[in-house]
Image (spheres, grey):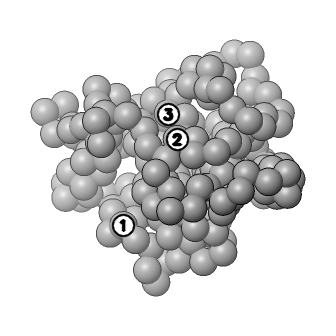
Amino acid sequence: MPLCWDVYVWVPQRAPEVFQLFIDRYVNTDDPGDERLSAFTRTYLTGTPTDADASALADLLWSGRDAFTLYLRSGEYPWAMITITDDGAAVLGLSLDGPDNSPLVRQQAEQLIEQLRREFSSPAGIAGMEMPPPGSRQEWQDDQVQLRIGTLADSPPRRAEPPVAEATPSPLRRVLKGGSPQACPECA
């Protein structure tokens, strides 16, 4: 299985228009690879979640946390990832095929970070080989990454509880692949 470079940008606010733009540009909506995209859309874009949506998204929660990642197929890239962080932000990501870890792939990752930062008004981007998405500001800062561009503001954002956490009692939370974030499914 080929290795992937995972490229992520930090989005300080969970704005529906940002999610919609990312989905429109980077997600294969005809075959997203995860049926929970509809639940995500109703919850985070239109604000019309159902109880079933809350349950579906609760299945993605990392053990004991409010963070989760939705891995989706992309038309242009192997994977598109949307991560809801513990602290009210989002992380948007794309995977690049990088079977030989060549300098060319690193250059493509750097260019993709810059492109995504412009598109989504992101203050910072990171990339690395087989790197799971950070689920919090702390993980963003602590992660050992191979490429880092930009910085996050020194003061953390005000904590915003995600709709899933409000609508879902904690017993519905379950461990996703051992309770930890994972690299893209086909790359891991």
Q: Nearer the viewer, residue 49 or 61?
A: 61
**In the image, what residue type sits under mark 1?**
Asp
Residue at the top extreme, as displayed:
155
Q: Nearer the viewer, residue 153 or 76?
A: 76
Secondary element under disc 2, as helix, strand or loop, is loop
Query: Mark 3 highlights which residue?
Result: 135
Total marks in image: 3
Expressed as whole percent of the image width and height from the top left, the position of residue 121 reads: 78, 47
Left or right: where 37 falls relative to 135: left
Left or right: where 45 falls relative to 58: right
Assess disc 1: are there few (<14), some (14-19) or many (≥20) residues with their C-alpha within 10 Å of its C-alpha.
few
Tell me what residue is drawn at x 66 percent, y 51 percent.
5
Secondary element under disc 3, as helix, strand or loop, is loop
Tell me what residue is drawn at x 33 percent, y 63 percent.
36
Q: Please tell me which of labels 1 and 3 falls first in the chain.
A: 1
Query: Mark 1 highlights which residue?
Result: 34
Left or right: where 147 falls relative to 137: right
Tell me what residue is drawn at x 57 percent, y 20 percent.
138
Q: Nearer the viewer, residue 33 or 44?
A: 33
How far apart are the two marked residues, 1 and 3, measured between alpha carbons? 19 Å
The circle on residue 46 is: none
**In the image, what residue type sits under mark 3?**
Gly
Left or right: where 51 falls relative to 74: left
**In the image, what residue type sits under mark 2?**
Pro
Assess disc 3: are there few (<14), some (14-19) or many (≥20) residues with their C-alpha within 10 Å of its C-alpha.
many
Task: Answer above or below: position of 136 versus 89.
Answer: above
Disc number lying in front (1 or 2): 2
Secondary element under disc 1, as helix, strand or loop, is loop
Residue at the bottom extreme, as displayed:
30
How far apart are the two marked residues, 1 and 2, measured between alpha carbons? 18 Å
The circle on residue 132 is: 2
How far apart are the two marked residues, 3 and 2, measured between alpha carbons? 9 Å
